[in-house]
Amino acid sequence: MCGIVGYIGSKKTKEILLDGLGELEYRGYDSAGIAVLQNNNFSVYKAVGKLVNLQEKAHDFEPKGFAVGIGHTRWATHGKPTELNAHPHLGESSYVVHNGIIENYAQLKRELQNEGVNFLSQTDTEVIVWLFEKELRGSASAFEAFSKTISQLHGAFAVLLVTKSEDETIFFAKQGSPMILGRDEEGEKHFASSDTPLIGKCSEVIYLEDGDFGFVKPNEIMLLDKGGNKKIPHFSKLSTNKLSAQKNGYRFFMEKEIYEQSDVITDTLLGRLSDSEIIFEELDPTLFDGINEIKLCACGTSYHSALTASYLIERYAKTRVSVEIASEFRYKEPLLCKDTLFVAISQSGETADTLETLKMAKVAGLKTLVICNVDNSSMVRLADASILTRAGIEKGVASTKAFATQVAVFWMLSLYIAKLKNSLTCKQIEDQIALLREIPRAVEIPNGLHEKITRLSKRYLHGHGFFFIGRDVFFPLALEGALKLKEISYLHAEGYPSGEMKHGPIALADPELFTIALLPQHILYEKSKSNVEELSARDSTICAISPIEFDKADDYIQTSSAHHYMIEFFEMMVVLQLLSLEIAVRLGNDVDMPRNLAKSVTVE
Ligand code: AGP
């Protein structure tokens, strides 16, 4: 989730841009840059790593008077976090910053290269500015060239472009990624990809809509819709509370991150799904040559996504999978064979136990892959290959969107390997890809669901414990639901395979034992249902989560009648996240910073 800022006016342009980027730090990034156009000259500064590096580079730069400026914090999606890949990107006499992913960039890049363009970066963004320069040569105005450029881009993009050919103008476009236009008391215009950089500077804003594009000049705003029809700019009042703005009005970062799962999974999938195959540009298919086993290793929630992956990879890629808890794996003197691909899974990429197991695999000569959410993390730098989950920074200690994006990546990876191993037909892969495209909708929260869970949560504030139970991939989901509850409510909860309850745990069944039962329609429903009936017969208090009404439950949360168990998985995941959130809220706990926990466990 990158960050964008822009400004046109006569105040302290550099400070406005850098302060704005500083307000976007919470979104996470691995490089940053600014470009300021004044008196038809560009001053550009870029840096890898933290914003302070950029501030140091631009320390002596102090533009005075009217200027046009754009800035960007980058969360690497295409190409490593390097200065060359940092935005803004230069054409001949123009600079651009961009959020999102240009899905057709490879084709556009080839066409431009065939016309002699030499690209400096590995990014999709650079295509935008070179396409603009090309169109500029054949257009009556810079805006005509900008309009032609935008019309050729597919995918998600929030773009700001400045050019010497019109040096008192910022061109903008919004499609899929957020962009806000703000106006301050003096009527000067500001841009940002979220409202926090604008708070305290602007009194009113326009939340641009998909398809909006246009330009701003000192005394003019040209706003058009995707049909090219002029729109009257309607400004609305801007909130004044930065922290609530960072939370986008939610009570907690965890709550915000549950609600943004649809958007971030859209990012996770972007550029990786064609109609017939999975595309991981960051992977060399030879990584899987000679591989007969895949070993997944992680901690906590990441371990739960690894367990989920084990079902998918064995089922679809017909490849043996073993799953390890990193803190155990480190000391068990494991047998490691070179035909095993070692995969570490980590949101932070810094978890000490997982990092150490990755080092063990490297020492043993295994090929290594990391599924991670932070591009320049220790694990990503160490592994042979990495796949980024693109969840954006996760501030809530209790992981939500990171888990969701890890499972989405693993579902894609199982199909990617299935293609390499011909373990699924083309039709089967196409059908699965169509299902993958449904995930963003599956994790949206239907009207009334959150309110129902909030009401229902009051019944689960005591008792002598919870069992979360499920079968197949719903067993690791049950583990994850139990962990979420433990982490933020401090109530005891266990995840268990439904079929295991009769092998001992059912001895605990009584009205004070709460069972959260996952009953998906499309996998082992009857088996799961009979397990829950055994508990109900012993008077356990049961909350059933299912598309099918379950008359023996004390509480019932209905999910949609999705037509595949993995869509049910994502729907039920959201229910479990919200349930743990609302129970913790009722108990008055600090949801974002639970006691005894850290976001990244970088010690043993
Ligand atoms: C998840 O809610 C917890 N915060 C914790 O279990 C976490 O998943 C675990 O510490 C692993 O962290 P990582 O994914 O950054 O490696």
Image (cartoon, grey):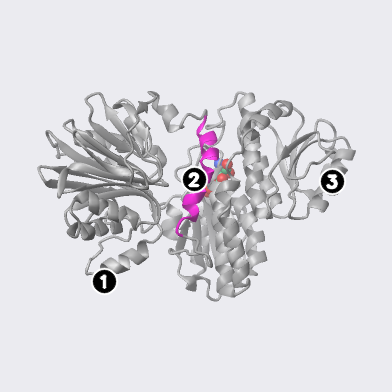
Of 275 and 342, which appears nearest the observer?
275
| Amino acid bearing label 1 | Asn
Q: Is residue 496 found left or right of 395 in the rendered image?
A: right
Q: Relative to residue 15, is residue 268 depicted above or below?
A: below
> Of marks 1 and 3, which one's residue comes earlier in the chain?
1
Per the image, label 1 sits on a secondary structure element best described as helix
Q: Amino acid at mark 3?
A: Gly
Extent of the magenta region: 252-271
Label located before the other in sequence (2 or 3): 2
Q: Judge depth for marks 1 and 3 and give the one in front.
A: 1
Q: Main secondary structure of the magenta part?
A: helix
Residue on which the image places disc 2: 263
Mark 2, mark 3: which one is toward the viewer? 2
Residue visible at 36% across and 66% down? 107
Q: Which residue is mark 3?
A: 504
| Comes first in the chain, label 2 or label 1 | 1
Label pair 2/1, CB-CB below 8 angstroms: no
* 544 shown above or below 146: above
Question: Within 10 angstroms of label 2, few (less than 14), some, or many (20 or more) residues?
Answer: some
For label 1, the residue is 114
Question: On the picture, is 118 further left or further right than 526?
Answer: left
Tell me where residue 140 appears, x and y as whole percent: 18, 54
Separation of marks 2 and 3 at Cα, in angstroms: 42 Å
Q: Nearer the viewer, mark 2 or mark 1?
A: 1
Question: Which residue in the rendered view is the most extreme toward the right?
Answer: 537
